[in-house]
Amino acid sequence: MESTLTQSIDARINTLIVDLSGVVMVDTMVAHQIFKLMDALKMLGVQSIVTGIRPEVAQTAVQLGIDFSDIKTAGNLQNVIKKFIQS
């Protein structure tokens, strides 16, 4: 987390895309770390977008009661990049 926050400030980014397409399992600890990172980035003025959530990860998150409703998500990285290029 510390590295991500420092690098975000140093690079003066406005948006950080977190791609989870390689993640095959999410438990409450992982989800909690993602939420903490997003909250810290938000405090620094960096918008976060989570992409690539696999169906099995989404299903597990719902079963565990993990609430992603306050986190901006997108289906895949390519769509997010296209959106940023077009705007």
Image (tube, grey):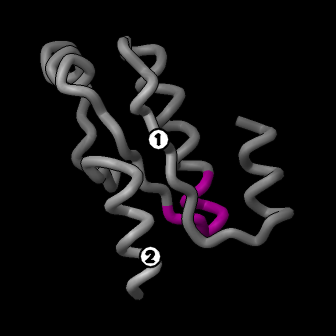
Say which of 37 and 85 sits in front.
85
Label 1 sits on residue: 19
Neighbour tally class for label 2: few under 14, some 14-19, many 20 plus, Cα within 10 Å: few
Q: From the top left corner, tell me how far across and down residue 40 is, in percent.
A: 61, 49
The reply to whether the magenta stretch includes residue 44 is: yes
Q: Residue at x 48, y 56 (%)?
A: 48
State whether residue 9 is above or below residue 76.
Answer: below
Q: Is 53 placed left or right of 10 in the picture?
A: left
Rounded to the nearest angstrom, the CA distance separating label 2 from label 1 is 15 Å
In percent of width and height, residue 56 lies at 20, 17
Quarter of image, res 14: bottom right
The residue singled out by tag 2 in the image is 84
Instruction: Report the front residue among 57 and 80.
Output: 80
Kindly state the secondary structure of the residue where label 1 is placed.
strand
Which three-letter amino acid code belongs to the residue tagged 2? Phe
First reached walking from the N terminus: tag 2 or tag 1:
1
Q: Is residue 36 left or right of residue 54?
A: right
Residue 52 falls in image quadrant: top left
30 sits left or right of 41 in the view: left
Q: What are the residue bounds of the magenta stretch? A: 41-47
Q: Quadrant of the C terminus?
A: bottom left
Helix, strand or loop for disc 2 = helix
Q: Classify mark 1: residues with Cα within 10 Å, few (<14), some (14-19) or many (20+).
A: some
- The residue shown at (30%, 34%) is 53
